Amino acid sequence: MALFLDQYTDIFALRKALDNKQISVKELTQTLLGDIKQHAHLNAFVDVQPALSLAQAEIAEQSLASGQGGALTGIPLAHKDIFVTEGWRTTAGSRILSDYRSPFDATVVQALLKAQTVSLGKLSCDEFAMGSGNEHAATGPVRNPWDPDVVPGGSSGGSAAAVAAGLVLGATGTDTGGSVRQPAALSGICGIKPTYGVASRFGMIAYASSLDQAGVMARSAADLALLLDAISGFDPRDATSIETCRGVANAPGRILSDYANFNATKNTPPLAGLRIGVPTEYFGDGLNNDVAQAVEQALVVLESLGAKRVSISLPNTALSIPAYYVIAPAEASSNLARYDAVRYGHRTETYTDLADMSARSRSEGFGEEVRKRIMIGTYVLSHGYYDAYYLQAQRVRRLIAQDFQRAFADQCDVIMGPVTPTVAPAIGSLSTDPTAEWLGDIYTLSVNLAGLPGLSIPCGFAPGHRSQPLPVGLQMIGNYFDEGRLLAVAHQFQLVTDWHQRRPGAST
Amino acid sequence: MALTETDVAFVAKLARLHITPEQQPALKHELNQVMGLIEQLQSIDTTGVAPLAHPLSVLHDIELRLREDVGLATNTIAQRNHLMQNAPATADGLFLVPRVIE
Amino acid sequence: MSWEVVIGLEAHVQLATHSKIFSSSSTQYGAAPNTQANEVDMALPGSLPVLNRQAVEYAIRFGLAIGATVSPRSIFARKNYFYPDLPKNYQISQYEIPVVLGGKLQCFVDGEPLTFNLTRAHLEEDAGKSIHENFATPDGRPCSGIDLNRSGTPLLEIVSEPEMRSAAQAVAYARALHALVVWLGICDGNMQEGSFRIDANVSVRPKGQEAFGTRTETKNVNSFRFLERAISYEIRRQIELIEDGGKVVQETRLYDADRDETRSMRSKEDAHDYRYFPDPDLPPLIITSAWMAQVQAGMPELPEEMRRRFVKTLGLSSEDVAQLCNDRQTAQYFEAVASALPAGQAKLAANWVMGEVAAALNREENDIDACPLSAAALAKLLLRISDGTISNKIARDVFADMWANNTLDADAIIDARGLKQISDSDAIGAMVDEVIASQPAIVQEYRAGKQKAFNSLVGQVMKLAKGKANPGQVNDLLKQRLDS
């Protein structure tokens, strides 16, 4: 079925149409609300409030009318339900917050509001951002627009599906172990997670504090640059927010400036001098051949643009899995302690005393995956185990971060490889062994452990479980604060390829 | 180190989660599968390696930024109610919970 | 069996900042429930902590004042446990690396100075309050109401070494610590409002035994009197228990003032596993030596220094200065009075500040800030005593007048009421002669050896002089006339 946004390749195209008054923001918004309704089977949205969206559209329209519009004025997007929003409910994909109304907006939400975007609603995610397939959401699985039988990825599955399906031109997500990059890859769109501390975590429901980072998803690297720049910036309400990076203020403008500067360099060919590190550990046994092929083809294209491939080693890559699955659950177990039915959230009906009330409310409200991770986290922090597990994991974390620094120091400028070992699996195909799902995170976890920026862009297709073609993503990892260059390299790739322009439903 | 059912019960108590006897065995099994994965960390020699708490401290020391001591105005009742709008039970502006006997 | 008592105290001191330790909410006491709690204090989803600079500065000030080490790098850790007045169900505190380590505090026990060592002091956030009155569910089950106004108030938890050996020592330490934190301006010291709370760790052991006995913790005592009673009760209870063949259980107890006893709260064995780990929301706190130097430079003169100085330069005794230097404002008032008097009159000033002035303030339940007499005005009055214009007794009258009528001019009152002391020896001599002449019987008694008679004659002279005769001169002249 034709979607309204299909006629616009990206934000720039829509910007032109809005500025030329080919369509009004209100009309656009109204139409998209209709498209969203028609695509309810994707289950991507969890809360839609037409009146609120139209009110934002009104503001954008007035701004355009008075000639004060900016690059993002009137652009339709939506927010992962992990960001608190006034007006729309916030549930974090959980029953424990099923009707929660936040009295304040997340900083990231405020930033995009200030940029005069129009929010179409809240997007489904894995419960408390824990999961890689958006199957752990209280409102049920989200479907991949490329094939409704497969997952869109997770935990920002609703965000990926909404962008991939053409219901919005951009979406916010969060990435703690790959939750923006992986769904972007599985859903055939672009997604980026910046350096830890570049985007504020204030108003982002905490999963693992030292790993969580806000990200954005869109149809192109150029769009990502606009959106990421808008949400980046120092926030005094977040003590882990970065003030300056390499002497430059962490503020809107920085990323766009770096991005523009790199693209403006008059190199021939455009990526001459760029060294691409390719980790041997990312091309081991677990990687599906067809996925490997698609990634390989992408690297060839980049070489044709003048880049040089360098084989590097990130020896502690495999350890990222146990390290992450100690640190993240540990921090989560503490972050989720506040959901005790005292001040908000689900409260059970029958209980004997306060402790019983909280325990039952939590067990009823939290899903299985969350309960499991809380138990793990509590256990690894408990007396006698803290040093052997948590501290040891943090030491391994340093080894992993040092691996990257060694590579960036004198071997390469950016690191590239696959995002996932396979294409999107079928919904419901999760194995009974909880750790099997986790092994698929191997290429993304270390980026969060090191706090580096990473993105995913479409680079081809590979056969799924029914041999149907499903999207493959190319991951690019940069050194700290290198988001601008990363996006520019991705943009150069997208100037000579069209993977990012493929749409579900059209022929691939 | 394998978790026993006592361990599982103790951890559930610390985590304030209600685990029924029926749920116990499956949960214990799953937790042990996870611990099996995590055990890999034990074999790594990390002598002389300091834990990394804040990822960017690999780049340079990260310091805690401090806030100036300026107090906000006391909230009006309306503002308070706005902040407390999600409370399951309140009375006279207080959050109500089952009485804890000390 | 001879017993030795071992006591260690933990004080929870609310720091007198304008805003809370991790949020900008006001810390003012007495607001309507939950009106001083924002999204951070209520631990709403998405909220994050940001540390208050002033709380750190106060901690530095305290550390320097007790000669402790101020840690250049300290870490905030999460102390995880579930409790309804703890909104995040973890308390942000400091564990392995606190902001202050070591230190010493001098206190006075029965007038004798004693110095105790401190273990550490760390920053943490206070919890909210549970109100237990008369709330119930519709079906009648009792409820408690939670007020989070106090939640997030900055606390400095100050831990002493277990060096006190009696309730008296413990109370003396607590008083001195209280006086110091108020002196430094870091705490308002209002114990009724909960600004200063003590937990007492008490154990007993047979005299001579090296190993410590099992200790109990009596929590949240908010008066020195209750502290003394709670510790005394605990000591008695533990000794009796052991002598009866029982064992002291390690547990937390509460002091019940109505029954004058401590009660078990919960067993520390069924203890929480706090699962401390560094708070990932808060990078390490760095305190530079420049900052420490700045705080040191702005430090007021400390009580111990001031006491030493008064003893040395003003010739006061240790007893005099112990009380005088209890709070900074009183000591400063005293010093201002003493410096307006001629040398050697400091004791007079000390007696009056600790005597008449203190009594008047106590009657009105005020502190020295409310004293209507400026230091200069009081000094003027005291000058009239030391130069013989009026007697001490008359001066008290003038003082009362000045206080009640808010007048600062002692001389004006002395003149208006004709209170000048009669110091003219001729005039006094005449009155003495008159009394001797009119009281032959009493004179006889004196000559017979009854000292009381002398006093009676003095009284008669004073009556004649309407109280205004210089008592010293009356004594001298009377003795002279009688003995001649």
Image: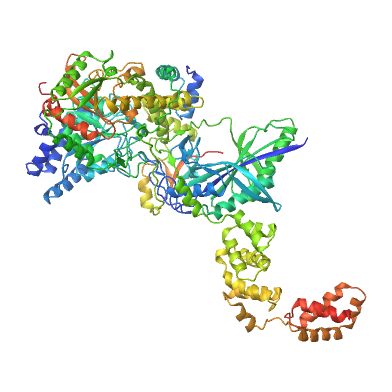
- Give coordinates of residue C266: x percent, y percent: 58, 35
Quarter occupied by residue A3? top left
Q: Is residue A235 above or below residue A405?
A: below
Q: Position of residue C302 (x, y in %)?
A: 57, 54
In the image: residue A425, left or right of residue A504: right
- Residue A386 spot, x, y in % from top left: 47, 26
A386 relative to A151 in the view: left or right: right
Residue at 20 percent across and 37 percent down: it is: A258
Given residues C216 and C284, the one toward you in this image is C284
Determine the residue located farthest toward the right in the rendered image: C448
Against A266, residue C188 (above or below) is below
Residue C46 location, quadrant: top left
Q: Quadrant of the N terminus of chain C?
A: top right
Is A287 drawn above or below residue C313 in the view shown? Answer: above
- Does residue A219 appear in this view? no
- Residue C392 visible? The answer is yes
Of residue C355 and residue B18, the one placed in the foreground of this image is: C355
In which quadrant will I find the C terminus of chain C?
bottom right
Residue A499 in percent (x, y) is at 14, 24
The correct choice, above or below, for A488 with respect to A113 in the image is above
Q: Camera-side residue: A291 or A271?
A: A271
Colour basis: rainbow
Res B23 → quadrant: top left
**How many labels sit on residues?**
0
